[in-house]
């Protein structure tokens, strides 16, 4: 499990490394449930940076159009599992699924060919994978 000390260290370091604290008041998107620790990056980064946490309805997280509209509504930062994002972008592509400032991939490896496609779609927006 995640200890309090581990979470404190994570929150103290990760937002700055990902550029989340550069713009207090940023909008952080959450597109997964809190059953795993994947969403902690968005939840806690929004709190420590003075940002806003936007949570997409659970029924909409597998709908590519709903997710694209959610992101277009002003999401600056998003963290997602690569396979989830790949499935969402299979129809209309990835460009509309990249937030305005920074995308973080986590939870699994991103296939190299797909990662190149994502980087091309992201343009000048930051993409982080860990």
Image: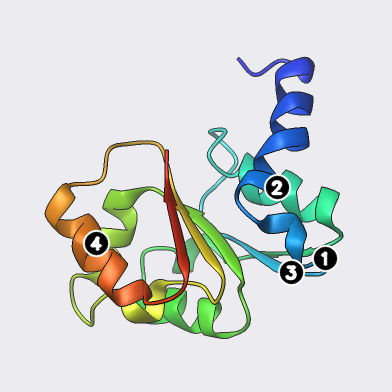
List the residue tagged with mark 1.
Answer: 24
The mark nearer the N terminus, 1 or 4, is 1
* Residue in view at x 23 percent, y 82 percent: 92
* Quadrant location, the C terminus: top left
Q: Are marks 4 and 3 in contact (CB under 8 Å)?
A: no
* Discs 2/4, front: 2
Q: Residue 123 at x, y = what percent?
A: 37, 77
Q: Secondary structure at mark 2?
A: helix
Q: Gap between marks 2 and 4, in whole Å?
A: 29 Å
Residue at mark 2: 16
Element under disc 3: loop
Q: Which residue is mark 3?
A: 26
The residue sitting at 38% across, 48% down in the picture is 81
128 lies left or right of 27 = left
- Secondary structure beneath disc 4? helix
Between the C-alphas of marks 1 and 2, the distance is 11 Å
**Residue 31 appears anywhere in the view:** no
Q: Nearer the viewer, mark 1 or mark 4?
A: 1
Rounded to the nearest angstrom, the CA distance separating label 3 from label 1 is 6 Å
């Amino acid at each position: 499990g995640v200890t309090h000390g581990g979470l404190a260290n994570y929150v103290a370091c990760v937002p700055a490394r990902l550029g989340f604290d550069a713009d207090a008041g940023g909008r952080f998107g959450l597109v997964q449930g809190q059953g795993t620790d994947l969403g902690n990056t968005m939840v806690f980064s929004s709190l420590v940076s003075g940002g806003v946490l936007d949570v997409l309805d659970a029924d909409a997280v597998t709908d590519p159009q709903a997710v694209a509209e959610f992101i277009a509504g002003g999401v600056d930062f998003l963290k997602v599992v690569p396979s989830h994002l790949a499935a969402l972008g299979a129809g209309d592509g990835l460009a509309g699924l990249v937030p305005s400032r920074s995308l973080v991939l986590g939870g699994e490896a991103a296939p190299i060919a797909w990662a190149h496609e994502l980087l091309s779609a992201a343009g000048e927006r930051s993409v982080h994978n860990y």
